[in-house]
Image: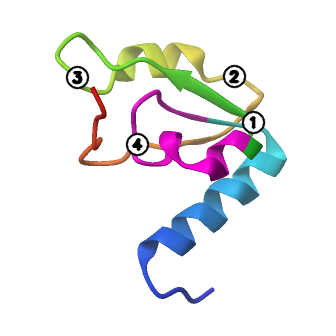
Amino acid sequence: MLGASSCELLIASLLLAATKGKVMMAETCYISAREDSATMKTEKVPLSKDYQYDLATMATRVNSESSMIYVCNPTTQRV
């Protein structure tokens, strides 16, 4: 697969993963605000009080419906 930037490749992999199950992500990460995420089956996890990924909570929510866990650095918060 080729893309002009990582954005196209990222979106393609997320959309593909969403066909297999839920994509877990932070509520305020780069992709969560995009229109693409509206068509995906997602499970959004709030950031911690200090605006960091709550990895412990994400880990407890992984189940048989999870197809991908999306962690982006930086989180590009919109607070």
- Tell me how far mark 3 sits from mark 2, CA to CA: 24 Å
Residue receiving disc 1: 41
Judging by the rendered image, the residue that carries numbered circle 3 is 51
**Measured Cα–Cα span from mark 3 to mark 1:** 24 Å
Q: Horizontal placement of 19 versus 53: left or right?
A: right
Q: Which mark is residue 71?
A: 4
Please state the extent of the stretch shown in magenta in the rendering.
Answer: 24-38
Q: Closer to the N terminus: mark 2 or mark 4?
A: 2
Q: Real-space Cα distance between discs 2 and 1? A: 14 Å
Q: Which secondary structure lies at badge 2?
A: loop
Q: Which disc is residue 63 wearing?
A: 2
- The amino acid marked with disc number 3 is Tyr
Q: Residues within 10 Å of mark 1 (few under 14, many from 20)?
A: many
Mark 2 belongs to which amino acid?
Asn
Task: Looking at the image, tell me whether mark 3 or mark 1 is earlier in sequence order.
Answer: 1
Q: Earlier in the sequence, mark 2 or mark 1?
A: 1
> Residue at the location (29% across, 41% down)?
75
- Residue 77: horizontal and vertical position, in percent? 28, 35
Q: Secondary structure at mark 1?
A: loop
- Residue 43 position within the rendered picture, expressed as x and y whole percent measured from the top left: 62, 26
Q: Answer with mark 1 or mark 4, whichever residue precedes in sequence.
A: 1
